[in-house]
Amino acid sequence: MPFDPLPKTLSEIIAGGASRPLTAVELGCGDGRLLALVRRPGVTCIGVDRMPRVAGSAADIVGDACRAPLREGSLDLLLAGNLVRHLVPARPDLGFLAGWLALLRPGGSLFILEDEPASRPGPAANHRDLQAFLARLWPTGRGPLLSRTAFLRRLPIRYQSLLADGGVGDNRWPQDADAAVAMLERGAPAPGDEAARLAAAIAAGGLACGRQWWCQLRVPGSSN
Ligand SMILES: C[S@@+](CC[C@H](N)C(=O)[O-])C[C@H]1O[C@@H](n2cnc3c(N)ncnc32)[C@H](O)[C@@H]1O
């Protein structure tokens, strides 16, 4: 899911494209909803995803976000929205960050955005439980929601001085509860199965992103 609102610092960088054109990439762009929020006159944003367009992605480049075929030092802005949690099971050391930061020009920024796992029952807890359920189906290919605290605990010390902004806030982007229920019921789960329990919880209580967190890692130097 994309993010609503976008962090203020990210919105300001994107708005700056009106006076100085920006080259951006979104890794793990999915169906392109975050791409659509970023693209505007003065901001070129290319989408990368492992899923091809025939599978519903908006990828301009189909490939692994950890080995994206992009030129080092070529980007003003790199985005990873709800992607890092998919990579953590295979790279718990966040080893992909070195390659991502190398793609940035001096003064360029990497924004990592994720949905924060809810701590109380309700629509956002259903989102948390749905993501945990999906992660268990493909344990090496995707992870459950990743909290900001858990991410920062994993962030290698050498990158901590690059942290320029970050926070946690509401994510008002709407979720499609009916589509989630239909997806869970497509497998015809037996009553009492986890999928059946989740479908019932979502049908009764709804589905929401809840809270989002972000952090901006900024490469030293001037972007002028
Ligand atoms: C939860 S979706 C997020 C979509 C979009 N970023 C957003 O915020 O709406 C995660 C996306 O990351 C992609 N993905 C996961 N692992 C990937 C990898 N190693 N390389 C490229 N894409 C990956 C998935 O195919 C999926 O489209």
Image (tube, grey):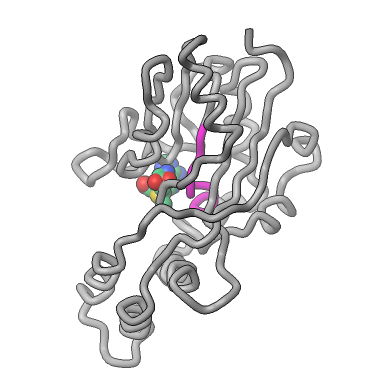
Q: How many marks on residues?
A: 0
The magenta segment = 79-87
Nearer to us in this view, 99 or 173: 173
The answer to whether 137 is drawn above or below residue 170 in the figure is: below
91 lies left or right of 187: right
Q: Quadrant of residue 37?
A: top left
20 lies left or right of 179: right
The residue under the point 61% across, 27% down is 109
The residue under the point 23% across, 45% down is 56
Residue 166: % across, % down: 67, 43
Q: Quadrant of residue 101?
A: top right
The residue under the point 37% across, 22% down is 40
The residue under the point 66% across, 52% down is 151
Which residue is the extreme one toward the bottom? 192
Residue 76: % across, % down: 55, 19
The answer to whether 122 is drawn above or below residue 43 in the figure is: below
Quarter of the image that includes the C terminus: top right
Residue 135: % across, % down: 45, 65
Nearer to us in this view, 115 or 59: 115
Residue 5: % across, % down: 49, 44
Is 13 magenta? The answer is no
